[in-house]
């Protein structure tokens, strides 16, 4: 029979101790030192933690423990661990250099084709046709020479604006110019000329032909000038061919009146070109800017327009007046100034 292992109490009762260990200190520790891989790992872990604590205290004292840097791999650590902690290898795109070389080759081919293949081989000039089949004032050879275009020069780099400017400067009767390029090597030039020209006298007494915009075209004689519609009452400064008319300022003249006369000339000539009777007007007198006078058909009619206000309206009234049978067989003054009323007044010459 086994012996009773229960301890007797003071009152003779027996109890069984139910107390359990409260912590690791109460547990029996294994005093046997670790050996092998477990021992080396434990030593490495402790050394790593100690190194992290020293680094946190010296270099980054304010950094929280959770923000500690990732430790560098130990030299004695396995190879797979060192590769994992090392910086990832950068991969370079080897196709970029090849693409760049191809792009340079394409650009070189394009530039080479521009230089070799697209050269000026032909220059075509389309001449304008005047009224009743009249020939143009300039020939095709004169247009080509004035353009400054040379054969075998690069077509794509040719400036159309520069060509037009050269022709305008050399040939004053040329009006509108169009320059076109036609691949592989043709330049087409078309232009118009001034159909109606006007004459004006300079302060030295010389006569000049000019366009509707007031551009000086060429010098002429008085006899030739009076076969055109000519302007009197406003001498201009002595010009050069291609210049724009500038009213001459005489001594003691009112500069504002001179400027007003010049504005009247530039306004009345384009307005007259829009009428059917422009070629029947002999001259325009602008002796005063506020009393504009037209002389019609060898001084048969003196037409007073006053100012250029409502100029289109006045010219329409003039056309209807000239179509009136009561006026057609008479000569006199046609008053379109509308000073007294809105009627046209006719005063016959005596």
Image (cartoon, grey):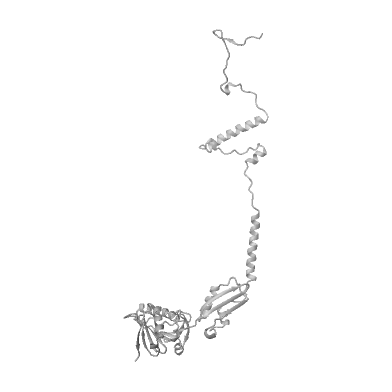
Task: Indicate the position of residue 211 as horizontal and vertical percent values.
Answer: 47, 81
Please tell me which residue is depicted at 60% across the width and 34% down the height of the picture.
Answer: 48
Question: Which quarter of the figure has residue 296?
Answer: bottom left
When the figure is inspected, residue 310 is found, relative to residue 102, above or below; the finding is below
Residue at (38% x, 87% y) in the render: 302
In the rendered image, which quarter is residue 133 located in? Answer: bottom right
In the image, residue 88 sits, relative to residue 31, either above or below, namely below
User: Which residue occupies 57% across, 77% down?
Assistant: 189
Q: On the image, which quarter does residue 283 sit in?
A: bottom left
Residue 262 pos. (x, y %): 40, 79
Q: Is residue 229 visible?
A: yes
Residue 24 at x, y percent in the picture? 58, 23
From the viewer's perspective, tell me whether residue 247 is left or right of residue 60: left
Q: Residue furthest bottom?
A: 350
Q: Can residue 232 be seen from the camera position used here?
A: no
Compare residues 186 and 244 and report the one nearer the observer.
Answer: 186
Quadrant (top left, top right, bottom left, bottom right) of the C terminus: bottom left
Please name whichever residue, 271 or 200, is drawn nearer the observer in this view of the structure: 271
Coordinates of residue 284 in the picture (x, y in percent): 40, 84
């Amino acid at each position: 029979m086994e012996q009773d292992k229960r301890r007797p109490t003071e009152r003779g009762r027996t109890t069984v101790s139910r107390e359990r260990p409260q912590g690791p200190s109460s547990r029996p520790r294994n005093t046997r030192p670790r050996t092998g891989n477990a021992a080396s790992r434990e030593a490495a872990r402790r050394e790593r933690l100690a190194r992290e604590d020293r680094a946190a205290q010296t270099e980054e004292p304010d950094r929280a423990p959770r923000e500690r840097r990732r430790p560098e791999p130990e030299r004695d650590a396995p190879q797979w661990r060192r590769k994992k902690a090392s910086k990832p290898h950068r991969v370079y795109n080897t196709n970029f250099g090849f693409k760049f070389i191809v792009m340079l080759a394409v650009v070189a081919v394009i530039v080479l084709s521009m230089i070799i293949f697209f050269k000026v081989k032909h220059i075509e000039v389309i001449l304008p046709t005047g009224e009743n089949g009249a020939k143009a004032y300039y020939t095709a050879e004169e247009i080509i020479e004035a353009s400054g275009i040379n054969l075998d020069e690069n077509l794509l780099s040719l400036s159309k604006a520069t060509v037009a400017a050269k022709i305008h400067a050399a040939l004053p009767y040329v009006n509108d110019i169009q320059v076109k390029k036609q691949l592989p090597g043709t330049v087409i030039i078309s232009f118009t000329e001034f159909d109606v020209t006007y004459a004006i006298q300079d302060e030295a007494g010389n006569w000049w032909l000019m366009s509707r915009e007031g551009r000086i075209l060429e010098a002429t004689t008085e006899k030739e000038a009076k076969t055109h519609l000519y302007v009197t009452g406003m001498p201009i400064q002595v010009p050069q061919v291609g210049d724009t008319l500038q009213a001459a300022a005489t001594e003691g003249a009112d500069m504002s009146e001179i400027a007003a006369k010049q504005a009247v000339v530039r306004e009345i000539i384009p307005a007259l070109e829009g009428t059917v009777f422009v070629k029947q007007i002999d001259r325009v007198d602008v002796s005063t800017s506020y009393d504009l006078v037209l002389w019609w058909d060898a001084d048969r009619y003196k037409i007073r327009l006053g100012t250029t206000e409502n100029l289109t309206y006045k010219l329409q009234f003039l056309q209807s007046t000239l179509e009136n049978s009561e006026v057609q067989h008479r000569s006199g003054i046609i008053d379109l100034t509308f000073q007294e009323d809105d009627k046209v007044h006719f005063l016959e010459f005596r």
